[in-house]
Image (tube, grey):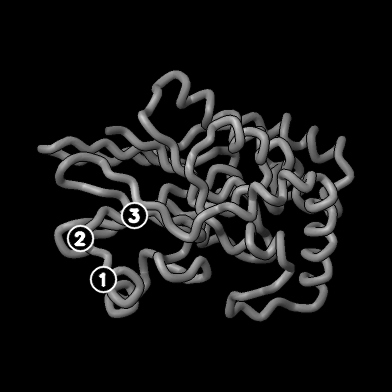
Amino acid sequence: MRVAIISDIHGNCVAFDTVLADLRRDPTDQIVCLGDAVQGGPQPAEVVSRLRALACPVIMGNADAWLLTGEETGKEQIPPERRRKMDEIRAWSLAQLSADDRAFIGRFQPTVTLPLDQEHSLLCFHGSPTSYDDIILPHTSEEEFQRFLGSFASQILTGGHTHLQQIRRIGDSFFFNPGSVGLTYSHQQPKDNFHVDPWAEYAVLTADDTRVGLELRRVPFNVAELIHVYHECDRPYADEMIAQYSRDA
């Protein structure tokens, strides 16, 4: 059984199409999306269209839920100016989506469990199995890591949310994050000079009765094409996103 795990597309269909093209060259048995698929980028409707065509399981991410409800559930304190911009981008994103599109997003699932073989199953979520807002990073303490995932350690575990590829052992199993398809970036860069990476990230998990393998992939996409999409659409604050990509255009 080979499963492609994608996450955090954030309305960037240029990057998403690059990943799908990569998977056509090397097909898997199943694709699963860990959420935060639609909100943020310039192509929310196009991403929904691709996900509909794939008919793959999709997890509800915090950005997906916020897009539909406008209710902030995370612990982060958001400054008023940033909140105003977020609200304007959300309104624009919703205007690009049909009622059927919004209903499709509303059917995203909290978690998905995929049987892999006689020995293994894959538990898929966004932040943690109990909350799409939970944050798991490489430096998350072992105590907190076990609190998030310890009771689920009989399975292979995968979550997104942090836009950071990682793998971490838990008991006799492991947790991994496939990274972000649509919005990768370095967590070590200064906030006042923020740049986004010119590649899409995802993972391929392979399991049979004797072995398990994990491949973390990074695929460059056409940044100039994405910048062109930003120029052509009327998404609010498109110039700010273009500036974050421009060093790689």
119 sits to left or right of 14: left
Mark 1, Cα crowd under 10 Å, few <14 / some 14-19 / many 20+, is: few
Residue under the image location 54 percent in, 43 percent down: 181
Q: In front: 89, or 80? A: 89
Which label belongs to residue 123?
3
Locate residue 224: give its quadrant. Answer: top right
Kindly identify the amino acid type of the residue bearing the numbered disc 1.
Ser
Residue 39 position in % (x across, y down): 69, 53
Rounded to the nearest whole Å, what is the CA distance between mark 3 and mark 2?
Answer: 10 Å
Circle 3 Cα neighbour tier, 10 Å, few/some/many (<14 / 14–19 / ≥20): many
* Left or right of residue 108, residue 227 in this image: right
Q: Disc 3 to disc 1, how far (Cα)? A: 12 Å
Q: Does residue 166 appear in this view?
A: no
Percent position of residue 107, x then y? 59, 52
Q: What residue type is labelled 2?
A: Ser
The numbered mark at residue 151 is 1
Give whichever of discs 3 and 2 has the lower sequence position: 3
| In the depicted structure, whether residue 139 falls above or below residue 11 | below
Q: Quadrant of the C terminus?
A: top right
Label 3 vs 1, first from the N-terminus: 3
Contact between labelled residues 2 and 3, with CB atoms less than 8 Å apart? no
Residue 11: x and y in percent read 68, 45
Q: Residue at x 53, y 28 (%)?
A: 20
What residue sits right under mark 2 in the picture?
Answer: 154
Q: In this view, does 78 lie above or below 227?
A: below
User: Where is the N terminus found, in terms of image quarters?
Assistant: top left
In the rendered view, does 209 fall on the left or right side of 143?
Answer: left
Point out the residue furthest to the left here: 210
Quadrant for residue 210, please give it: top left
Identify which amino acid the numbered label 3 is placed on. Answer: Leu
The residue at 46%/37% (across/down) is: 218
